[in-house]
Image (spheres, helix red, strand yellow):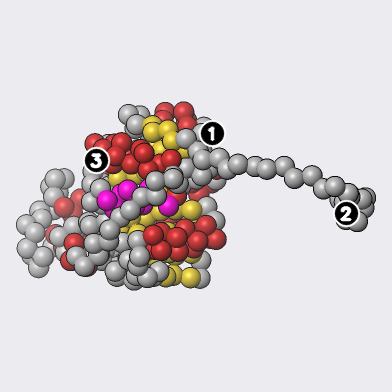
Amino acid sequence: MPRRYCAACLTNAKACCSSTACGSSNVPGNSSNACMSNSPPTGRSISGKPTLPRPQTLERHVGFQPVVRFPDELPITGQRERIRQALDNHPVVIVCGDTGSGKTTQLPKIALAAGRGRAGRIGCTQPRRLAAVSMARRVAEELNCDLGRAVGYQVRFDDRTNNETVIKFMTDGILLAETLGDRRLLHYDTLIIDEAHERSLNIDFILGYLKNLLPHRPDLKVLVSSATLDVESFARFFPGAPVITIEGRTYPIEDVFLRRPTPTSTQPGR
C-alpha cells in the first residue's frame, strides 16, 4: 500500500487526517482532498527525507542584470528572436544545428534574455564533465561574471554553484540524480538538454522523464539541442514542438605541402 501525503503539512495522510493540526480541513475518505496524493510533496524525497526548498530566485537574482550580448559571427545569433518567440509560446523547443553554430553557449543566454531564470535556475546538461566545466567558464566570461556565482557548474565530486547561481551547467547524470529529491525539478524554470542526438541512456531517461513531467509543470520550458541527426524522432516524441534549424559555421582550410620529406614522414606507420 503506497504512502499518502498531506500537501498542506507534509505529514503522513493518516496522521494528518486524524488531527486538525495543519488546518487543511482534510476529511478521511474524501478523494478530492490533498491527503489523497500518492506522490511525496514538495520538500520531501521518495524516502521521506527533507530536501532543499525551492530557491527564491525572484529575490535572490534581483541584483543579477547582466548585459547579454550575442556574437555576430555565430549563426545562432540571427535566429535568437525566433528561438525566443518559440520559447514563449511552446513548452518544448527543438533546436537543430551543426557544430560551430553556437548552440551550447548561446542558448542559456537566449533563455536569460527572454526572462527565464527568475522563478528557478536555467539548467543545461552536457554528456561529459569536461564540456560542462568548459562551457560554464565560457558563458561566465561572456556575461562578465565570476564562475561559481551567477554562472556555475556541477559535476561528480565538484559543485561550483551557490544560492546566487542562475545558469547551471551539469552532466546529465547529475540532473537524473536530482530527480530523486526534487521529483518535479522545482529548482529549474528552464532546462536545456544539449547534445541530445547522442541518445545515451541518461539522455533518453531525461527526455522521457520531462515528457511526463511537463503536464504537471506548465511553467517549465525545455530546449532540446541536437545536431542534424535524428531530429525527426525528437519531433515525433514531442508533438507540436517547433523545430528551428541553424546552419553551422565552417573554417577555411589551407593545404600546405613540404618541399622535401621529413624524417618522421618516411618512417613506417607515420
User: Would you name the residue on which mark 3 appears?
Assistant: 88
Please indicate whether residue 137 sits to the left or right of residue 70 in the image: right
Residue 54 position by quadrant: bottom left
Badge number at residue 136: none
Task: Work out whether mark 1 precedes mark 2 in sequence or the reverse, and give the earlier one.
Answer: 1
- Can you say whether 168 is above or below 230 in the image? below
The kind of residue on which mark 2 rests is Thr
Task: Work out whether mark 3 precedes mark 2 in sequence or the reverse, and give the earlier one.
Answer: 3
Please indicate whether residue 139 sits to the left or right of residue 255 in the image: left
Q: Residues within 10 Å of mark 3 (few under 14, many from 20)?
A: some
Image: magenta residue range: 105-113
- Can you say whether 159 is above or below 218 in the image? below
- Frontmost residue, 242 versus 1: 242
Distance Cα–Cα, label 3 vs label 2: 59 Å
Task: Work out whether mark 1 precedes mark 3 in sequence or the reverse, and give the earlier one.
Answer: 3
Taking the spot 25% from the left edge, 48% from the top edge, the residue there is 114
Residue 182 position by quadrant: bottom left
Please indicate whether residue 66 sits to the left or right of residue 154 in the image: left
Taking the spot 29% from the left edge, 70% from the top edge, the residue there is 163
Distance Cα–Cα, label 1 vs label 2: 40 Å
Taking the spot 47% from the left edge, 58% from the top edge, the residue there is 135
Q: Main secondary structure of the magenta part?
A: helix
User: Would you name the residue on which mark 2 appears?
Assistant: 262
The kind of residue on which mark 3 rests is Asp
Instruction: Report x, y in % for residue 267.
Output: 92, 53
- Can you say whether 231 is above or below 117 in the image? above
Instruction: Report x, y in % for residue 141.
Output: 41, 63
Which element is circle 3 on?
helix
Badge number at residue 229: 1
User: Is label 1 in contact with label 2 (beta carbons under 8 Å)?
Assistant: no
The kind of residue on which mark 1 rests is Leu
- Frontmost residue, 18 versus 259: 259
